[in-house]
Amino acid sequence: MTVNWHAIDTVLLDMDGTLLDLHFDNFFWMQHLPKRYAEQHNLSLEQVSTKLEKRMRDYQGTLNWYCTDFWSEEFNLDIVALKQEIDHLIGERPFARSFLEALATHNKQRVLVTNAHRDSVELKFAITGIDAHLDSVISSHDYGQPKEDQRFWQQLQDNIGFDPERTLFIDDSDNILHSAEQFGIAHLLGIEQPDSQRAPRQSASFPMISSFAQLLSIGT
């Protein structure tokens, strides 16, 4: 993977599926939450899984889809507490920390930009400590718009003052990468295997990396 680091001042990084393994989130929403919901309502897992999947799909791409408060109220369950039950599954993707350290060595601004609610962000920081290697942390809930919305990027630019032409953005969602591209961010990379327990994905739109080890030659 060749990146022209001389043309980049700011690196924007997604959290779930990019810096961190998406396995935790997929397991939580597709297995742990349905199991707990079924137990609470004395229903079969089959009944619950279809119901919850449809309900969540209705909000996909909106801020509510990423909001722990919204789903706690929607399902009458404490989403953060349920996540804590399986927090041993939270982990970093290969060489994520080494990459962040290399960026700092070469004076690149490191900004986490995530759609995750602040509750989820804080839980994952408590487990990984990866926030110590970031210069700024932005949740789309801070702005009231998800990364799929152009208003998110405008507020982010107003907030941290990045130059889109000299910015690299790395995310595991093609939809969000397209949104960043529409805003004018010049350097874009996807993630080949966001969930370590699932097969690698393909993208016809953006170059992808399988590991941050591919990006460690920042000084060359």
Image (cartoon, rainbow, N blue to C red):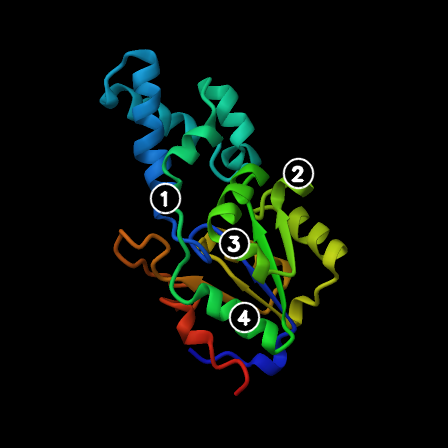
Per the model, the C-alpha gap separating discs 2 and 3 is: 26 Å
Q: Are marks 3 and 4 in contact (CB under 8 Å)?
A: no
Per the model, the C-alpha gap separating discs 4 and 2 is: 30 Å
Determine which quarter of the picture holds residue 27. top left
Give the residue at x 55% y 27%.
69
Q: x, y percentage for residue 112?
A: 58, 56
Amino acid type, callout 4: Glu
Q: Secondary structure at mark 1?
A: helix
Q: Which mark is residue 101?
A: 4
Q: Which mark is residue 144?
A: 2
Residue on which disc 1 sits = 88
Q: Secondary structure at mark 2?
A: loop
Q: Is residue 23 above or below residue 207?
A: above
Determine which quarter of the picture holds residue 146. top right
Residue on which disc 3 sits = 129
Per the model, the C-alpha gap separating discs 4 and 1 is: 24 Å
Which of the two marks, 1 or 2, is nearer to us in this view?
A: 1
Q: Is residue 71 above or below residue 19?
A: above
Q: Are marks 1 and 2 in contact (CB under 8 Å)?
A: no
Per the model, the C-alpha gap separating discs 1 and 2 is: 30 Å
Q: Secondary structure at mark 3?
A: loop
The residue nearer to you, when weighing 161 against 78, is: 78
